Image (cartoon, grey):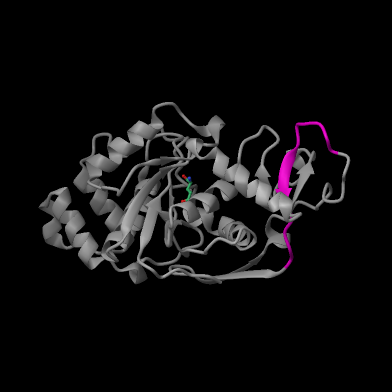
Amino acid sequence: MDIRNDGYTGRFAPTPSGPLHFGSIVAALASYLDARHNDGKWLLRIEDIDTPRVRAGADRQIIDTLEILGLEWDGDIVYQSERLGHYEQALAMLADNDLLYRCRCPRRVTKGKPYPGTCRTRADIDAKPYALRVKTSDRSIIFEDVIQGRLTGRLNELTGDFILRRSDGLIAYNLAVVVDDAGQNITHVVRGADLVDTTFNQIYLQSVLNLPVPVYAHHPLAVDDSGKKISKQDRATDVLAGVSPEAVLLRALHFLEQAPEQNLMRAGKRDILAWAITHWNIDAVRSSPTGKRA
Ligand code: GLU
């Protein structure tokens, strides 16, 4: 597989469905520190194509939070809603290679199970609405996750042929993310472990679209007291509500097992980040498939 090593470009790619919560701060900080420690670039991409989840003004709130924390990105912010033409181009390429088909199955067909391929051989679906699925194979997909170690999966056991464009016209996350990671020359993806399984779909798409495969690192997910993922949608409150940026950064560094020094407890955010960039040690971030109490 084509793994790029020419320089380092990382990214943070939040969905603007609400204010950043502690779990998304961990993702932002881990990807930022890994990039800066490696003298790399760190880009910001707002993943705003899943319109039913997008909340007006949440992008601004996210940007403000990153600024308050002192996490400075490089270049212009990319909005996925401005890149729809690129996703359509990728779909056209897959269609040319006979890897795409129309599907009319209701969503409940797949609830928790791989899609059985019911519409793969149907040639009679003309009128919209229909979803577009990509044909997958049963070969093993293997990648070395920097934090989780070697991971192997087969799409026929995970998702089966998966949706790239929904019947309501929305482009699926898996398609947009691979098109954009390649379009922005992302070499390293550092994000939460809730996205580990989607990596198999993404590596598959990279192979059929002839795109490079970045290095992946999935950090443990911050979960609440009941073991559930903290999500932007269920937390109305901002991570900074009543808490200083320094306290948030230190808490996230502890979560990432970076053992911030005692003398940082009274430091300003610039000094905390400077220390964290120098001392960043991704090997200290322990894998935890079940999530970790925030
Ligand atoms: N937009 C996704 C989210 O907010 C993250 C995508 C990614 O890092 O690949 O959960």
Q: Where does the image place residue 9, in percent across and percent down from the top left?
A: 37, 59
In this view, the residue in front, 126 or 130, is 126
Judged left or right of residue 149, residue 170 is right
Q: Range of the magenta residues?
A: 125-138
In this view, the residue in front, 225 or 144, is 144
In this view, the residue in front, 182 or 19, is 182
Judged left or right of residue 184, residue 99 is right
Residue at 72% across, 43% down: 132
Residue at 52% across, 70% down: 2
Q: As displayed, is residue 116 above or below residue 87?
A: below
Instruction: Report if residue 237 is visible in the image.
Output: no
Instruction: Report if residue 112 is visible in the image.
Output: yes
Q: How many marks?
A: 0
Residue at 52% across, 33% down: 53
Q: Where does the image place residue 151, in percent across and percent down from the top left?
A: 56, 70
Q: Dividing the picture into quarters, in which one does residue 262 lie?
A: bottom left
If the image is split into quadrants, where does the N terminus sit?
Answer: bottom right
